[in-house]
Amino acid sequence: MGSNLNPKEDKFSLLLDPLSVEDIRCHGRETYPHECCGALLGHGELVTKVLALRNTTDEGPRRRFLISPADYQAAEAEASSRGEQLVGFYHSHPDHPARPSEHDLAHAWPVLAYVIISVRKGEPGELTSWRLKADRSAFDQMELTIGEAGQETS
């Protein structure tokens, strides 16, 4: 499951290419006022592709998201077919900050990256990235960089 993201460092980073960022922003806009969700594919701290997934929650998609086991397996298979890994997930917070909620904390897995986008009144805004501490007590914010490998901009 997943990859390691600089496992021996205290500071973690994630590099998203501009097309992936635009895909996440569009997905958040399209699903508003509900939460969108998807998978991050790539190598280590480099995300090369995002896969939009269905939010299958029955708890109310405005405040929760759930990725079905079948969609999770399909994301893993897609990553494998590309010679990559599932490095994390993204989701939106409609009309809330791009910060992990208590629900996010309770359902996250260590080692994976979690990108959150705030979507306010249908417009995508702040984009942040997080990683669960090994003891599962809280998230550490990751440095999020947008750019192509070797051509990064913050």
Image: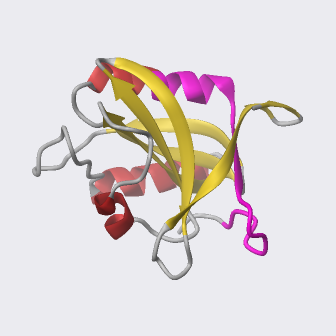
Direction bottom: furthest residue:
135
Foreground residue among 136 and 75: 136
Q: Residue at x 64, y 64 (%)?
A: 3
Rendered location of residue 58, percent (x, y): 10, 50
Screen quadrant of the C terminus: top right
**Residue 85 visible, this orientation:** no
Direction front: furthest residue:
97
Left or right: residue 99 versus residue 8 is left
Determine if the magenta segment contains residue 8.
yes
Q: Residue at x 11, y 51 (%)?
A: 59
Q: Which residues are magenta?
A: 4-25
Left or right: residue 37 versus residue 78 is left
Q: Residue at x 26, y 48 (%)?
A: 65
In the figure, 54 relative to 10: above or below? above
Foreground residue among 74 and 20: 20
Direction right: furthest residue:
150
Rendered location of residue 44, percent (x, y): 72, 57
In the figure, 53 relative to 151: above or below? below
**Residue 31 visible, this orientation:** yes
- Name which quarter of the figure residue 120 lies in: top left
Determine if the magenta segment contains residue 121.
no
Rendered location of residue 14, percent (x, y): 69, 48
